[in-house]
Image: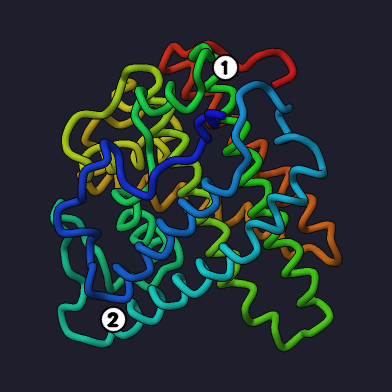
Amino acid sequence: MSQQPRDVPPPRPVGGTPVEGEVVGADSGLGAAARALADAVAGLLGRDEPGVGTRGRDGGGPGRTAAGARAATGVLADVVSAVTAAARDARAGSGREGSAGTDDRGGTTRGNSAPSGLLGDLLDAAAPRLPIRDGARLRRAHPGASDAEIADALVARAARLTGGVGAATGGLAAAQWFAPPSLVAVPLELGAQTVLVAAVEVVLVGELHELAGRPAPGDARARAGAYLASWSTQRAVGSASSGGLFAALSTAGTAALRRRITRRLARSTTSVAPLLVGATLAARGNRRATAALADRLRADLVLPPSAPGA
């Protein structure tokens, strides 16, 4: 009996072509951390159950969130390790003369010890490796579904995953309240949550653009940069308020990315509320933020809005 295609993206970048030179800083702690982050996102997306249709704006109810949190816990640990490695590399680099280098787009890559700068560099380096499918792949994964139904499924999946990551972080933080010395790990977990949620949302941004028939131009790296800029501004690529197609290439684009990371990091602090309150707040906040991002993009891309109750 033939099996229905699963809504699981391949572990490769937009278009399925290799990224020339891998990621920025491939031989450094940042490069290794970026690969770990991209692999973690691919793992999360691959574990999520397939399906088309609406499951509710909160991601499918408490049962689905709990399942997502269990799946996200191991992945979160991997990303914590990646963030730790990137932070260690940044600290080592800041002690060397001229350590702040430039990437192939002319932007500063390392030597930035601010949390938003470090997490922004990590997300930027991982973006070309994120598993973003093109329109043809999306339609093959959802046979017989309309574009509106596929968009609903993509948003529901992303909301489940970002909610699960928030719940996982909150659960770990709750456990650490009973072992105060381990609270030193909380900032790393907040950074990991922030960059993991951001990466899942960048995949959503890219796939909504691809589904709408408005893919960003250029090679895999250029498209990834455009989708990351779109996530930073919370608007579609090329829209009037997105800062332009090449916002990611400019100092303004870097500043927008860091501002968005800072806001996400601030929102992540709800995870450390006592007991399991933090898990609930973080899961709900992440799901709502993901849904709000999707609504803005769907309007910009002229994709049908979410179905009632979706």
Q: On screen, 245 above or below 172? A: above
What residue would you read off at disc 2?
A: 94
Q: Which label is found at residue 299?
A: none
Is 88 on the left-hand or right-hand side of 168?
A: left
Q: Is residue 25 above or below residue 221?
A: below
In depth, the one of 193 and 94 nearer the eye is 193
Q: Quadrant of residue 31?
A: bottom left
Pointer 1 local density, CA inside 10 Å: few below 14, some 14–19, many at least 20: many
**Spatial CA span between label 1 and label 2:** 48 Å
| Left or right for 144, reference 100 | right
How far across and how far down the image is residue 57, in percent?
70, 29
* Element type where label 2 sits in the image: helix
* Quadrant hosting residue 203: top left
Image spot of residue 239 (x, y percent): 33, 21
Residue sitting at 40 percent across and 56 percent down? Answer: 38
Q: Residue at x 77, y 85 (%)?
A: 180
Question: Disc 2 residue type?
Answer: Ser
Image disc number at residue 149: 1
Residue in view at x 51 percent, y 23 percent:
142
Please tell me which residue lies in front, 284 or 51: 51
